[in-house]
Image: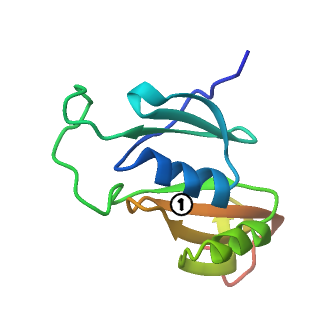
Amino acid sequence: MFERNKLVPELMVTNLQSSLAFWVSCLGFKVAYQRPEDGFAYLDLNGAQVMLEQIDSHAGQWLTAPLSRPFGRGMNLQIDIEAVAPVIQRLDQAGVSLYRECKDTWYRAENVEVGQREFIVQDADGYLVRLVERLGERPLSVENGR
């Protein structure tokens, strides 16, 4: 049986097929299952999971206000992956521009810094997706220690 995570965001999308092209072909997710008759797909990438649901004004969906692009304002979805380079290459081949270029970033976490090679891309509906390759930990530097 497929194991579902305890927290799985469900993203409302304007066109399920174009969203699947982005999430599956570019980002590397697999379709765990879908209900085409409902415009729904449940995706998985090594335990990172997301649900996509096509907007349907007659389906009684849980919308608290009218949607306007870009969707997902105020949040980004961080997804750990093995390596960012192959994903960037697939996005480039598909003609998808990066929202924020790839760079190595170190974030303070208590008494260490955790590193990640990261970039941000926007899907067709405007959701920000931050893909992260873990670089490990290092001691907190004096200049960043507060």
For this view, does 35 lie left or right of residue 70? right
Residue placed at 26% from the left, 30% from the top?
Answer: 61
Residue type, numbered disc 1? Val
- In the rendered image, residue 38, in percent from the top left (x then y), is placed at 39, 27
**Residue 121 coordinates in the image, percent (x, y):** 54, 69
Q: Residue 60 vs residue 120: left or right?
A: left
- Sort mark 1 into few (<14), some (14-19) or many (20+) by Cα contacts within 10 Å: some
User: Quick one: 60 or 146, which is closer to the camera?
Assistant: 60
Where is residue 11, by image quadrant? top left
Residue for badge 1: 129
Which of the image's four quarters has the N terminus?
A: top right
- Residue 12 in view in this figure: yes
Assign a secondary structure to mark 1: strand
**Residue at (20% x, 36% y) in the render:** 57
How far from the left and from the top, in percent, is residue 120? Answer: 56, 70
Residue at the spot x=41%, y=57% of the render? 75
Q: Is residue 127 above or below residue 139?
A: above
Which of these two is toward me, 13 or 46?
13
Tell me residue 137's x, y (percent): 82, 64
Q: Which quadrant of the structure image shows residue 111?
A: bottom right
Residue at the image point whose x is 39% and y is 63% from the top: 126
Instruction: Choose between 106 and 68: the one closer to the eye.
Output: 68
In front of the other: 105 or 68: 68
Q: Is residue 103 toward the left or the right of residue 125 in the image?
A: right
